[in-house]
Image (spheres, rainbow, N blue to C red):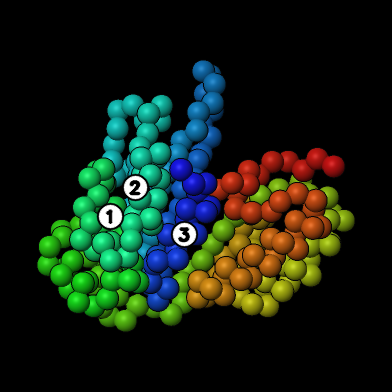
């Protein structure tokens, strides 16, 4: 299975850029007297509204000790790797969550005719919401957000060096806040513009800070700074 950041990027490569569709995977640490446990969560938003939420919409008595996260990742990878000529008719036998129809509804390779067919045969509310927006022309701008693994304990001299790069983000409409989980960036813009600006900032920040900067909810854990 691919790392989440690469899998997410591959999936976004087939999603209609005109709709405000985002998919996330994150883990929250639960502390108790018995120790600590990761609480994984998968969720999809459309125009900022959560339309798919695991595990909330799919209760499991063994959660968080047994989860469907690996299976969901495998399903997304199977979807991404399915040839485009088969993607609309393909039956994903391991899909217990209705996720494949959500992805089909958001897939830019499925045009108006296929969307109309999908609308007639599915009852998945999330998929139907996506279809309605796509048939209505979509949206040019998308709400974007990411939390980078830049901990608030970064020394003041390094924050000063980061400031020009942060000001450049601000000039392009990207706001920021320093949170316990990292440096949160958010804005509203087309996906390609967002990806380009974030990639440029991460590259610059990595050179300044001396460690790889990236998505704190993905492959780049946010930990206190240590020179």
**What residue would you read off at disc 2?**
75
Residue 161: horizontal and vertical position, in percent?
Answer: 84, 62
Q: CA distance from mark 2 to mark 1?
A: 8 Å
Picture mark count = 3
Report the residue marked by disc 1.
100
Q: Earlier in the sequence, mark 1 or mark 3?
A: 3
View extreme (top): residue: 34
> Local crowd at mark 2 within 10 Å, few (<14), some, or many (≥20)?
some
The residue tagged with tag 3: helix, strand or loop? helix
Residue at the disc numbered 3: 10
Residues at circles 2 and 1 in contact by the CB criterion of under 8 Å: yes
Q: Which element carries disc 1, helix, strand or loop?
A: helix
Q: Secondary structure at mark 2?
A: helix
Asked if the residues shown at circle 1 and circle 3 are in contact, with their CB atoms under 8 angstroms apart, the answer is no
Res. 133 visible in picture: no
Q: Residue at x 61, y 57 (%)?
A: 184
State the residue in front, 117 or 125: 117
Q: Is residue 198 left or right of residue 206?
A: left
Q: Is residue 4 above or below residue 168?
A: above
User: Can you give x and y, in whole percent of width and height, for residue 90 in the image?
Assistant: 23, 56
Q: CA distance from mark 3 to mark 2?
A: 13 Å
Q: Position of residue 149 (x, y in %)?
A: 66, 50
* Residue occupying the point 80% across, 40% down: 226
* Mark sitting on residue 140: none
Instruction: Give the quarter of the image for residue 174.
Output: bottom right
Report if the CB atoms under discs 3 and 2 are less than 8 Å apart. no
């Amino acid at each position: 299975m691919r790392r989440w950041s690469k899998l997410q990027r591959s999936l976004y490569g087939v999603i209609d850029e005109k709709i405000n569709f985002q998919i996330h995977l994150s883990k929250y640490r639960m502390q108790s007297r018995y120790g600590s446990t990761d609480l994984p969560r998968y969720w999809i938003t459309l125009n900022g509204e959560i339309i798919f939420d695991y595990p909330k919409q799919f209760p499991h008595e063994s959660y968080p000790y047994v989860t469907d996260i690996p299976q969901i990742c495998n399903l997304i990878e199977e979807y991404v790797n399915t040839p485009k000529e088969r993607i609309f008719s393909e039956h994903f036998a391991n899909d217990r969550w209705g996720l494949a129809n959500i992805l089909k509804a958001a897939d830019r390779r499925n045009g108006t005719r296929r969307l109309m067919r999908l609308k007639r045969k599915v009852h998945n509310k999330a998929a139907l919401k996506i279809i309605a927006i796509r048939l209505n022309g979509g949206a040019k701008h998308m709400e974007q957000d990411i939390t980078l693994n830049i901990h608030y304990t970064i020394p003041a001299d390094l924050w000063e060096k980061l400031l020009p790069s942060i000001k450049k983000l601000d000039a392009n409409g990207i706001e920021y806040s320093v949170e316990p989980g990292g440096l949160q960036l958010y804005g509203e813009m087309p996906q390609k513009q967002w990806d380009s600006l974030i990639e440029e900032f991460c590259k610059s920040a990595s050179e300044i800070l001396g460690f790889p900067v990236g998505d704190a909810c993905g492959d780049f854990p946010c930990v206190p700074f240590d020179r």
